[in-house]
Amino acid sequence: PSTIYLKDYQAPDYWIDTTHLTFDLHEDHTLVTAVLQMRLNEDANRGEALPALTLHGEELDLVSLHRDGEELEKDQYQLVKGSLTLPVEQPRFQLQIVTRIRPQENTSLEGLYKSNGMFCTQCEAEGFRKITYYLDRPDVMSVFTTKVIASQARYPVLLANGNAIDRGELDNDRHYVTWEDPFKKPSYLFALVAGDLEYVEDHFTTMNGREVTLRLFTESHNIHKCDHAMVSLKKSMKWDEEVYGREYDLDIFMIVAVDHFNMGAMENKGLNIFNSSCVLASPETATDATYQKIEAIVAHEYFHNWSGNRVTCRDWFQLSLKEGFTVFRDAEFSADMNSRGVKRIQDAAVLRTAQFAEDAGPMAHPIRPESFIEISNFYTLTVYEKGCEVVRMIHTLLGADQFRKGTDLYFDRHDGEAATCEDFVKAMEDASGVDLTQFRNWYSQSGTPVITVTDRYEAETGDYHLTIAQSCPATPGQEHKKPFHIPLGLALLDEQGQLLPLNAEGGNSEGNREQVLSIKQSEETFVFKGCKSKPLPSLLRNFSAPVRVRYDYSKDDLVFLMKHDTDSFNRWDACQRLGVMAIEQLVEQFDEQAEQAVDSQLVDAFGALIADPKLEHAVKAEMLCLPTEASLAEQAEEIKPLAIVAARKKVKQAIAETHSAALLALYNELHNELNHGDYRPEASDIAKRTLKNVCLGYLAAVDDAGYLQRSAEQYNAASSMTDRRAALGCIVNARHRDEHLVEQMLTDFYDRYKDDANVMDDWFAVQSSSAELGTVEKVKALMQHDSFDSTSPNKLRALIGGFTRNMTHFHTTGGAGYEFLADRVIELDKQNPQVASRVMMPLTRWKKFEPVASGLMKKALQRIKAVHDLSTDVYEVVNKSL
Ligand code: HT7
Ligand code: ZN
């Protein structure tokens, strides 16, 4: 496999002005006729001779090829693996290409494939080339017309992008619908669906008074689960008008739910295709977290209509242009719809746990990568989540008004074009006048910057000196880094916990009490005047940049910040830091036999937290959650899985036992408050349920069967999946498990939901991720279960992904967990390379583990590497990580 470099980008030799597609769908094959109106790209070709045309194409049978009405014989073109090359005689010409494909055999879920009997497509990033020969690259934008022909009985619903312009019946029970999309688009936004589907319909009137029809299609048994997504869609459409001035542009917007899908959802123009797990919800089958996920993903895909579709990416190195920006847009939308503080905490937690790990691992890359072998491997947390943080920093540095001027300029300048990250930054600079020269390092440099803060207080002058140094560890291919331009949110707390006015040296005397410092040097010192005593700094407020902050906080400082800081993120962060300190202390002294004392300061601080009557429920729930095993692993110098699991468990237990009465009281209070009404996925109710279930989780850690009984009661009486699922988790993972109760509950859960594919995913995950249940033998047995579907990425992610997150059994079974994963990767690579490459990611972190685990992980990777004919997906990951 070859490496593709950003520096080698060249504009295409030809454009495709119009694309007419006809799909003749049959059970054993599909015939695709593509009629392409081609035009020479004169900017790229001013010479005499017309360059040959090379089209992408994979796994296609070429049936016929015509150029300007004349059939080309086999010796007139070249067909090699992955491409078709033909000579060109005129600067404008028409091609007619007929290919035969086999969607029913397509297990990669790229291109045209079948899910539960329906046809659907996934073309991003390079799936369109599995449909027909084409210039399958995002800078080639064309106007598409699509005619879909199929059996009327089997596929009554025929969909493609745009507006339906024709439909009719044909002989032999066949019918057709023709769709026209007036907007130019790259092939990756093409979509087609054919199936026996039902739909719910609604309408939206745009800011300019246009009526848009909204339809959500599902298989009939799921039709009652569409309401939440529809409400979310309408909220998103309104929000994008109000916050960005962006209006929807077609007469119809459609969403289709499919069970077999490699990712969450896809923003195809006018025809979004969703993984059913990211769109379908009912109170009985979806948790609060799923409701919130659906709201965010529906918004994300809808927002792509402007940030991605109207303005697309020039090449795949620019992926973060659409993804980072759109994640920022959806995060702000979710913050407006729910608790802003909690959304920020949750996003920061994901970034710090999983993206920081990616940045510290063998696949580290800048948000705009410089090279890749397989683009599917670059749909990463770095491109998406760190990309979002980079856009957020621009927002912070410019302020909301200038940022909006910047996005207006960006959309105006590049509407209908394929743009670059540089175009985005330039629009921001031009609109605001803010110089982002140094800021651009965020696009080109990988790795997580470290900010080291030291301070000094001069009692005589009242001056407080804050010195901020930045550095960034080396990452593959990038030994030395230039300093970043970092917005650092700051406040100073006095001894009473009040925020001090920030009277910076040389600044005005009545400073603000919160400030964003613009850090640009390797080291710089800020002096704040008029401090009566040494202040306590509140650093990186609102997680203002994707960096690690090192400051020598004492435990007292952290307890103080937990109580007094006005910034939700920092209050939570203080809790996390205290938790990490307490757990790491136990990890260091880890000894399975010895009794170890848990830090009493932490236990007391958590007691105060539980009792705090003023704290927002949702923030309290987040603060009460100890650092996850994954985040502890990310922060460890060397990962010792067993010690982490044991230490964290011990700390949780100590908090639970010391405060069981308060936890039970809080649990009962919230439980009673919630018991009055029907389930509502509203932020205030979600906050109460979350906090209540955090309390239940602690109670399950107490050595008292009575509390386990409380979980069982909640499980049996639950009127929502949130409560039932939380209780099931408590029972399965309780400290002193009641084997009989566990079996009874898992069987009950299965019996209730066995017909619901999405809930069954969770049934598999709860078992494979359980420290108590999820042994490698159990996981192997579950793979043979009737409800397991090895062709479903959701099932694979639930069972195998759940197991690889299971620190106890994945890492501590003498390598059996790693060998099991290697076997699955080798097997899956033949079937679905994208999923294979994703599930193997945990192995790539082998260098960070303690020696025995590390060696065994490496061995498993070497076995994968030795396999012949690996896909480009797995090949790239395995080779970069060894
Ligand atoms: N833009 C979409 C990306 C996507 C995708 C990429 C590779 C393989 C399968 C895929 N399905 C969807 C999703 C999004 O970010 O909105
Ligand atoms: Zn996206």
Image: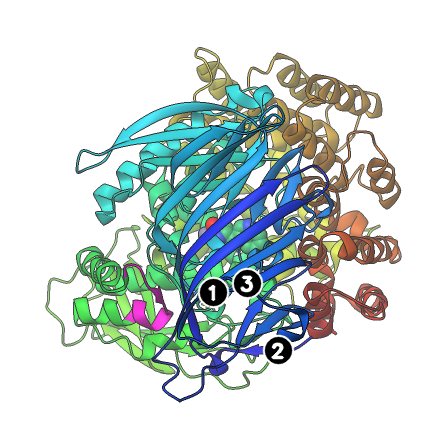
Measure the C-alpha gap from mark 3 to mark 2.
Answer: 33 Å
**Which residue is at 14% across, 76% downward?**
506
Local SS, label 2: loop
What are the residue bounds of the magenta stretch? 415-425
On the question of residue 98 being in view, the answer is: yes
- Comparing labels 3 and 2, the label whose residue is closer to the camera: 3
- Disc tally is 3
Q: Which residue is under mark 3?
A: 66
**Residue 834, placed above or below residue 72:** above
Q: Which residue is mark 2?
A: 3
Q: Is residue 539 visible?
A: no
Left or right: where 400 falls relative to 73:
left
Q: Amino acid at mark 3?
A: His
Residue tagged 1: 68
Residue contact between numbered discs 3 and 1, judged by CB atoms under 8 Å: yes
Q: Is residue 416 magenta?
A: yes
First in residue order: circle 3 vs circle 2: 2
The kind of residue tagged 1 is Asp
SS label for mark 3: strand
Mark 2 residue type: Thr
